[in-house]
Amino acid sequence: MKTVALTLYKRRVCPLCDDLLAVLEGMPFAVTAIEIDGRKELEERYGRSVPVLLGPGGKVLVKGRLDGGGLRRLRALLGGGAI
């Protein structure tokens, strides 16, 4: 199974961000975490929406709390496998 590259926009202190990272651990994803704190452009773009998880092509997979829709999108990246 190939590794899928994901980008996570997060804040330094963000329990939802920490929870999402914990879910992603051990999965075949290469996650690049980017803190938006102190980066005006990123704070304006993502603000209070973090965590924001982007998949291939910049597609938004998760915005805010990880829900059933986000889990389905992650599962689809894995070819429909279990998460």
Image (spheres, rainbow, N blue to C red):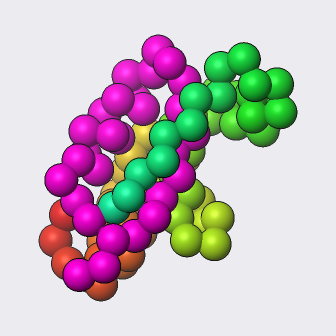
Find out whether residue 2 is within the magenta segment.
Answer: yes
- Whether residue 49 is visible, yes or no, is yes
- The image quadrant that residue 73 belongs to is bottom left
Residue 2 point in image, percent of width and height = 31, 79
Residue 82's place in the image compared with 7, above or below, is below
The stretch in magenta equals: 1-28
Q: Which of 55 and 48 is in front in this view?
A: 55
Residue 82 point in image, percent of width and height = 16, 71
Q: Residue at x 48, y 47 (%)?
A: 32
Find out whether residue 61 is within the magenta segment.
Answer: no
**Apparent side of residue 65 relative to residue 51 in the rendered image (left or right):** left
Q: Which residue is drawn at 35% across and 29% down?
A: 18
Q: Which residue is drawn at 54% across and 32% down?
A: 10
Q: Which residue is drawn at 26% across and 65% down?
A: 28
Residue 79 point in image, percent of width and height = 30, 84
Quarter that holds the C terminus:
bottom left
Residue 1's place in the image compared with 65, above or below, is below
Residue 50's place in the image compared with 27, above or below, is above
- The image quadrant that residue 57 belongs to is bottom right
- The image quadrant that residue 14 belongs to is top left
Quarter that holds the N terminus:
bottom left
**Apparent side of residue 24 relative to residue 59 in the rendered image (left or right):** left
